[in-house]
Image: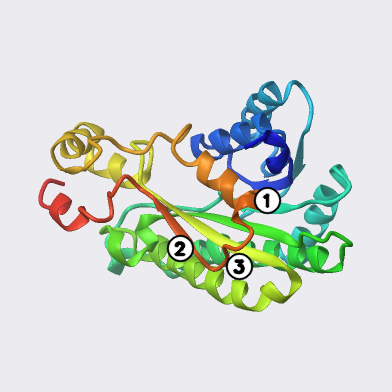
Amino acid sequence: MGDGAYAKRVLLASAGDDVSRGIASTLATHGCRVVLVGDEGALAGTAEAARRCAGGGGVAVVGLDLHACDEAAVDAAVDTAWRCFDGLDAMVNCYSYEGEVQDCLNISEDEFKKTMKVNVMTPWFLVKAMAKRFRDSESSSGGSFVFVTQIIGAERGLYPGAAAYGTSLGAIHQLVRLSAMELGKHKIRVNAVCRGLHLGDRFPESVGKEKADKATREVMPLRRWLDPDKDLASTVLYLVGDESRYMTGSTIYVDGAQSIVRPRMRSFM
């Protein structure tokens, strides 16, 4: 497979975290031009890493407050991103708000609303803005959406203390299926990558990294947590590229079977 098959123009919504940094760098390495959308300061390191992989160019940053933005602000940011490389071919959403790990009865109304706003409403605004442009463009290939979620929002990977966060990610899984059903007529594909947890995620941190690492060695099939720099990017690249042109409405699990062993793992953690 030549890199040319993946030379796409991609909007990447990101917080500048390890997962999105690995994805941005891999996309750039394979010839994609990447527009990072989010807090400009937080994205500086991710942009620099991606530029190194791209040989110094092909990476832009568009500022957007993903917590407080309304639909008009999202549309304006997408318009700016669209003009960076004279159009876009795909969107990858890596951004989500985890909040604190806490008992479900302690979650405040404001916290629950914030979680749903950032993790469901803002991605929906992004889908609307991008899909309208995909529909109206002259591209024959339509467009591709990829949502990076976590097993915390999937039926087989539930964790305690994540009622708001898990619910919001569960909504994204349904959004993937429903929007794929309706956007297919415009040659727009919508898929998700459901990732496992890494030691920097809130839940492993809440139980203690030493305890979490010990449980991993004794329970998880691959005997390790997710490597955020390397384990996800190839799957995202596949869904962005033309090789996945007949895939839509699907969720690919990249979790090292964490979700399969979750019931057994609970006794260790």
Residue drawn at point x = 80 percent, y = 48 percent? 81
Other residues around mark 2 within 10 Å, as few (<14) / some (14–19) / many (≥20): many
In the rendering, at what x and y percent does residue 56 appear?
76, 22
Apparent side of residue 238 relative to residue 37 in the rendered image (left or right): left
- In this view, the mark in front (2 or 1): 2
Residue drawn at point x = 46 percent, y = 61 percent? 251
Judging depth in this view, the residue of 75 and 183 nearest the camera is 183
Q: Secondary structure at mark 2?
A: helix
- In this view, the mark in front (3 or 1): 3
Tag 3: residue type?
Met
The disc label shown at residue 169, or none: 2
Q: In this figure, which colouring scheme has been used for the structure? A: rainbow
**Image quadrant where residue 226 sits:** top left
In the rendering, at what x and y percent does residue 184 appear?
67, 73
Using the rendered image of the protein, determine whether residue 158 is visible from the camera's viewpoint: no
Give whichever of discs 3 and 2 has the lower sequence position.
3
Give whichever of discs 3 and 1 has the lower sequence position.
1
Instruction: Quickly name the residue at label 3.
Output: 121
Instruction: Quickly name the residue at label 1.
Output: 65
Judging depth in this view, the residue of 165 and 220 nearest the camera is 220
**Image quadrant where residue 245 sits:** bottom right
